[in-house]
Image: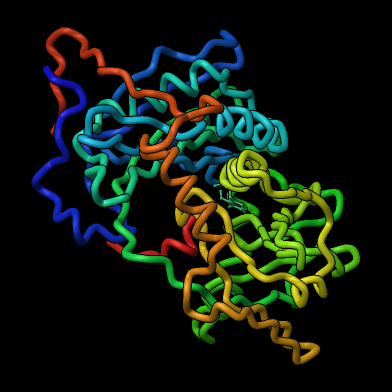
């Protein structure tokens, strides 16, 4: 068998969008508190999980998840996953917040490799510029009545082919003022479901009012920018001497964005100044470019930021165009991810040809805006 196989012809790759689709299946492993072992990885030809209704993952929000991407190189010769080691580490941090055992990095990497490898025909063609979204998920899975950690945990990896974006449209942003995403000493840095569901009512209301992206400030002082609801905050400032500075929001209550840290390294590599620090909300008036960084939508330029309580609207000069600094960062990031540029920092992990057990064969919608994706 030649690996990777070509992209399946069952999908119209010019019209994929960002929605749930059927693939070959997912990967599962379970951990027992008694044996202290993860079971060997299993490929399950089914999108459904069989879970006891009393599982703490369902009842008490004892779960955490990740999001990363796999892409084909030119000529579709190879499939790479982008920086999965970073997601493995972040998932370990998230798991500790909700009293779950951590998934060892090698188990995480093998599971992700298997999930992509066994669904390789669903990785979009290189020419489309799109990737496969990979969703690892860990949760307390054995039945438990009291609020104490259960005996069994389940780790699964799902994959989904995602869409092709023809250009990037700058978005309008609303600062959320009547809701705090993260408590000062809370769980804001953990990628746990409990940080996301409470935002939905606010982000949906904002979207209905014409704001495609929502922003959070720190809940203690309402002074510093934390992050967007599903992505990191980055800004660019040009100096009169022609120097470029990339500023990245830092706060202990935000998700450590792999996209933002990759872009930070790219900026350093091309000789820009970089600052990772607290950013006062009012500084938005001084930036030349603002963008959101996240796996699902990569980088998205922000064309305005509104704070309703003070009747403030910061507007960026580039309007509906894609600004220069943003394009430099996006093109370099995508170039590395898609195997067109040198991988100086070892960010690409090549997917290996899957091994099938004897007698085992491959088994054989709701639109979501990519910016609102996680
Ligand atoms: C709240 C939040 N911030 C930032 C990010 C960006 O992280 P990454 O670049 O690793 O996808 C995400 C998405 O994972 C997120 O959900």
Name the outermost residue toward the front: 241
Q: Is residue 321 above or below residue 209?
A: above
- Whole-percent x, y for residue 313 in the image: 70, 86
Residue at screen point 41% across, 32% down: 81
- Whole-percent x, y for residue 133 in the image: 38, 44
Residue closest to the eye, 320 or 220: 320
Residue at screen point 84% across, 67% down: 280
Name the outermost residue toward the bottom: 311
Q: Which quarter of the picture shows residue 292? A: bottom right
Quadrant where the N terminus is found in the figure: top left
The answer to whether residue 179 is left or right of residue 157 is right
Residue at screen point 46% across, 36% down: 136
Residue at screen point 42% across, 61% down: 370
Name the outermost residue toward the right: 221
- Whole-percent x, y for residue 174 in the image: 64, 78
Total numbered badges shown on the rendered structure: 0
The answer to whether one can see residue 192 in this image is: no
Residue closest to the eye, 281 or 344: 344
- Whole-percent x, y for residue 190 in the image: 68, 43
The answer to whether residue 199 is left or right of residue 353 is right
Q: Is residue 129 above or below residue 33?
A: below
Residue closest to the eye, 340 or 22: 340
The answer to whether residue 227 is left or right of residue 21 is right
Q: Is residue 318 above or below residue 309?
A: above
Q: Which quarter of the picture shows residue 93? A: top right
The answer to whether one can see residue 211 in this image is: yes
Specify the color scheme: rainbow
Residue closest to the eye, 175 or 21: 175
């Amino acid at each position: 068998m030649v690996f990777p196989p070509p992209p399946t012809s069952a999908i119209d790759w010019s019209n994929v969008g960002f929605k749930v689709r059927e693939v070959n299946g997912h990967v599962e492993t379970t951990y027992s508190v008694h044996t202290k072992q993860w079971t060997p990885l299993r490929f399950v030809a089914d999108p459904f999980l069989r879970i006891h209704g009393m599982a703490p993952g369902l009842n008490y929000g004892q779960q955490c998840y990740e999001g990363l991407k796999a892409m084909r190189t030119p000529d579709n010769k190879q499939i790479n996953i982008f920086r999965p080691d970073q997601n493995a580490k972040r998932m370990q941090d998230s798991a500790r917040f909700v009293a779950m055992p951590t998934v060892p990095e090698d188990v995480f990497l093998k599971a992700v490799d298997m999930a992509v490898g066994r669904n390789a025909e669903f990785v979009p063609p290189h020419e489309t510029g799109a990737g496969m979204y990979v969703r690892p998920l860990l949760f307390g899975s054995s039945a438990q009545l009291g609020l104490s950690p259960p005996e069994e945990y389940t780790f699964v990896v799902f994959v989904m082919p995602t869409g092709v974006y023809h250009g990037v449209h700058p978005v309008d942003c609303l600062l959320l003022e009547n809701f705090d995403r993260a408590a000062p000493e809370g769980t804001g840095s953990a990628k746990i479901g409990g940080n996301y569901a409470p935002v939905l009512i606010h982000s949906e209301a904002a979207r209905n009012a014409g704001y495609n992206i929502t922003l959070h400030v720190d809940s203690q002082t309402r002074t510093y920018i934390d992050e967007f609801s599903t992505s990191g905050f980055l800004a660019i400032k040009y100096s009169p001497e022609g120097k470029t500075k990339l500023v990245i929001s830092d706060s202990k209550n935000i998700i450590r964005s792999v996209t933002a840290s990759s872009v930070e390294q790219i900026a350093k590599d091309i000789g820009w100044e970089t600052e990772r620090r607290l950013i006062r909300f009012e500084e938005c008036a001084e930036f030349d470019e603002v963008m959101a960084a996240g796996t699902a939508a990569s980088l998205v330029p922000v064309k305005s930021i509104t704070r309703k309580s003070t009747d403030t609207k910061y507007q960026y000069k580039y309007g509906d165009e894609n600004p220069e600094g943003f394009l430099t960062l996006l093109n370099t990031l995508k170039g590395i991810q898609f195997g067109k540029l040198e991988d100086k920092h070892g960010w690409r992990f090549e997917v290996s040809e899957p091994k099938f057990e004897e007698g085992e064969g491959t088994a054989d919608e709701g639109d979501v805006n990519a910016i609102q994706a996680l």
